[in-house]
Image (tube, helix red, strand yellow):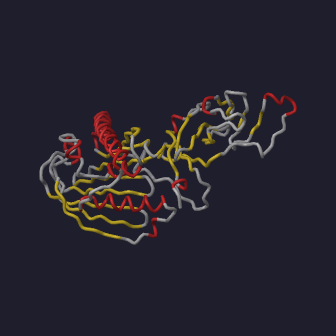
Amino acid sequence: MKFADFWYIVGLSNQLKPNKVISRTILNEWLVVFRGADGKPVALQDKCIHRNSRLSKGKVCQGKIQCPYHGWVYDNTGTIVSVPSEGDNFCESKARKCQSYQTLEQDGYVYVRLSSLSEEFTPFKMPFYQQPGWETVRVINRFHNNVTNCAENFIDIPHTASVHPGIFRKPSKQQLEMTVERRNGCVFAEYRNETTNLGWFRKFLNNKGDQIHHTDSFHMPNITSVEYDTAANRRLFITSQCVPEAENSTLVYTDVTYNYGIWNKLAKPFVHWTAQYIIHQDVEALKIQWEVIEKYGTQFANTDADTIHIFVESIRNCIATGKDPRKLPDKLVEVKFWV
């Protein structure tokens, strides 16, 4: 197993208009993405095989992309279908083509997979996307850090009181309990004793101070999901997909999907602003972390509250070494910590 075996987002479906060209990087591979003549997404290596120009700098016409340098034209399979300099002597050849990749669309996202692995992994299903009674706010941010550290940040409670004080939690010396479980390439953390220390979100999530059902999860290789469910039948999901551009660059697509009843539409601008404000704080925190990692390495001093991080790292490290993390032994740990 390797990271290239999985599906990664390359853009929003509504971004990819006919004749629109999108340039993306996944796992250091340059991609050009556009819609073919049939309207389906196409992903090719962003390199003309002729003189190594960037196809993403070219233009799309009738579902084919033309290199901006000498005008070579590629179809949705990467096959050369026109070479202007060859004129009437042009002869299409399956041997002359650039690398193409699998694509699909799901939940308003366009996905690409770099590997042609036979095992049929599928993209993560975004919770309640476009279902009646639910609203989704979608934000995109680039982090100067790797996927592992980004994913750990998104499901880490202790940092919230320091990085987002007052906005999303504040230091209160409240004891929380969590059950952390690793199984089948996933990590699940279930929290207990949370009630009112939710910052601005308290008014929407738990105005009466009821007991909260809060679960965080990680799904190999790059997905995190945070769920808040209260007795007032108010639910919130924060789902992030980390796209590895390079070792020090991660593009993160985040869906905040919620059910606040009659407040759904009114809350949308507030949810969007707050989500983006919090994420900007995390972007800065992770940028600083990466600066230190580049200088001193990744020797972390872990506490019990970091158990979820340790499990995530064990899964990511498995894939990095070509192993299947679903074969790791199931493990469950009970943890107490303070926020």
Image coordinates of residue 98 in percent, x first then y, are 69, 42
Report the number of numbered marks.
0
Q: Residue furthest bottom?
A: 329
Image coordinates of residue 70 in percent, x first then y, are 72, 28
In the image, 190: left or right of 294? left
Q: Residue at x 68, y 31 (%)?
A: 67
Q: Residue at x 67, y 27 (%)?
A: 68
Q: Looking at the image, which is closer to me, 289 or 43?
A: 289
Image coordinates of residue 14 in percent, x first then y, are 51, 35
Q: Looking at the image, which is closer to me, 21 or 4?
A: 4
Q: Residue furthest left?
A: 173
On screen, residue 190 above or below 145 = below
In the image, 317: left or right of 180? right
On screen, residue 99 above or below 63 = below
On screen, residue 149 above or below 189 = above
Q: Residue furthest right?
A: 89
When asked about the image quadrant of residue 50, the answer is top right
In the image, 106: left or right of 170? right
